[in-house]
Image: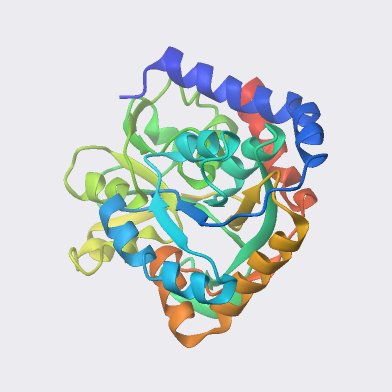
Amino acid sequence: MLKKFATLGLTVGLAAGILSGCGDAGEAEGSTSYKPEELTVQFVPSQNADTLEAKAKPLEELLSERLDIPVEVSVSTNYNTIIEAMDSKKVDVGFLPPTAYVLAKDKGAAEVMLQAQRYGVEDETGQPTDELVDFYKSIFVVKKDSGIVSLEDLKGKKIAFQDVTSSAGYVWPAASLMDAGLDPLEDVEGITVKGHDQGIISVLNGDVDAAVVFQDARNTVAGDYPEVFDETEIIEFTEGIPNDTVAVRSDMDQEWIDKITEAFIDIGKDEEGHEIIKEIYTHEGYVESEDSNFDIVRDYAEKVKTE
């Protein structure tokens, strides 16, 4: 269960770090000389960590071939640990969702290199469109016939959240609850689960009344739970969230940033590489990005902190 005082502290800490960490980031940007002899790449667990690591491991060889150094791929235990690992220089490249990236950036731990591209998702069917987009939404999923048809109906109900630095799994949905007049700390019972797939499974099993997940995370469990679309429904969509980042530790040598950037863009275009990144995070490829693309994330962090 999300202990209210702990969640409040983390949420306030997130927003405070985002708003006040810029000085540290500037200092880090002044020292960009790290040249890796072995590259460490880490993912956050958007699904079962063991499954995700197995899917991500083939990236080691593809990246190593392009960079001509050994590459180690791993999965963090949660969003906070990957930020800490990048800050302590134990991880060179992190796949960070937008809120986690902004916290890492403003802590002086990371710089954005790339932003993922995904196919859009049809609101009605949950199936992909043929249009590549640089944003996604979070959704509130409940069981059909639950009697829950609006956010207001969630008062007093049990909701599966992700870590409080998860954009789709906490920050954007928390803001939506606030807009509906609900305090995400006081008016609902928050349960932390690890992985958006686990959020959906928790709804199917009746462990929670609702789950907040990226659109449409039901596809990640449809193989094991073919009834998922028949048994669940979406009661609310959030506004758009910037797509995930590929971020590099803040002291990385610029020449190496350029090499790593080119390697990931190339992998996204390569047939084998494309299949791997699609399996991991439904990424279709990568485009170069800049920090200002994530100013909206800072706005949402401030909203969750103060309203």
Residue 232 x/y as whole percent: 28, 56
In the depicted view, which residue is nearer to us: 228 or 73?
Answer: 73
Residue 178 in percent (x, y) is at 56, 30
Left or right of 68 on screen, residue 4: left
Position above or below: 23 against 123: above
Which residue sits at x=54%, y=37%? Answer: 83
Report whether 181 appears left or right of 290.
left
In front here: 138 or 50? Answer: 50
Task: Kindly indicate the quadrant of the structure image that contains residue 132.
Answer: bottom right
Q: Residue at x 79, y 49 (%)?
A: 292
Q: How is the image coloured?
A: rainbow
Residue 203 visible from this viewpoint = yes
Q: Residue 209 versus residue 37: which sits nearer the camera?
A: 37
Q: Quadrant of residue 11?
A: top right
Instruction: Give the image location of residue 277, x and y in percent.
Output: 46, 70
* 260 with respect to 200 (left or right): right
**Residue 52 spot, x, y in % from top left:** 33, 58
- Residue at figure coordinates x 34%, y 66% from the top left: 55
